[in-house]
Image (spheres, rainbow, N blue to C red):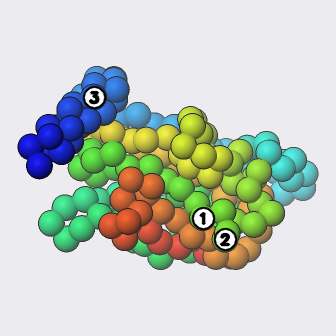
Amino acid sequence: MKINGLALIVGAIVLGACAGGEKGTPKTEGSAAAPAAAPAAAPAAAGTAAPVTGKTIEVQMIGDAKGYRFEPNVITVKAGDAIKFINVIGFPHNVGFDPATVGDQQAQFAANMPGDHTMGPLEGPMMMQPNETYIVSFGNIKPGTYGLHCTPHLALGMKGTVTVQ
């Protein structure tokens, strides 16, 4: 049992060392204030990031005594809106979408998710610092309901849904 505990502590130290960056400095990917596209603009090709043309909705990523969760965990957006995910406390979190719910839009979802995709095409990069943010555009995403999760905390129930109208 002591070996398992030691392995857990060493893993946490290594993971923390890999986070890099200055503490307390929020890392923001994307822009919440993207300019609106012209109404007659042609849609971006699948696999090309679509700009944010609507509003940006904030969703907190929380891990505390109540558990791991997105607040809110049921989100409704319009095509062209964005979601700004905020790592409130600084536990390792990421944003991922369930491939079974994304279906034939996998290339567009992946293109709208900036950054590192080493965990998978529908997985955003790991966020380690308090107040670190990650913005996902829902431009060129078809109406429907899509499963959302945090990969490190999926087994602990950190999931939700995004409905695009």
Q: Judge left or right: residue 59 versus residue 39.
A: left
Percent of width and height locating residue 115: 57, 36
Percent of width and height locating residue 141: 74, 62
Q: Tell me whether the residue at label 1 lies in contact with that at label 3, contact meaning CB atoms closer than 8 angstroms.
A: no
Percent of width and height locating residue 133: 42, 44
Mark found first going from the N terminus, 1 or 3: 3
Q: Residue at x 90, y 51 (%)?
A: 42
Q: Residue at x 59, y 39 (%)?
A: 117
Q: Amino acid at mark 2?
A: Thr
Where disc 2 sits, the SS reads helix
Q: Judge left or right: residue 81 versus residue 132.
A: right
Residue 14: mark: 3
Q: Amino acid at mark 3?
A: Val
Q: Find the distance from the CA under tag 1 to the CA under tag 2.
A: 6 Å
Q: Tell me whether the residue at label 1 lies in contact with that at label 2, contact meaning CB atoms closer than 8 angstroms.
A: yes
Q: Residue at x 21, y 42 (%)?
A: 8
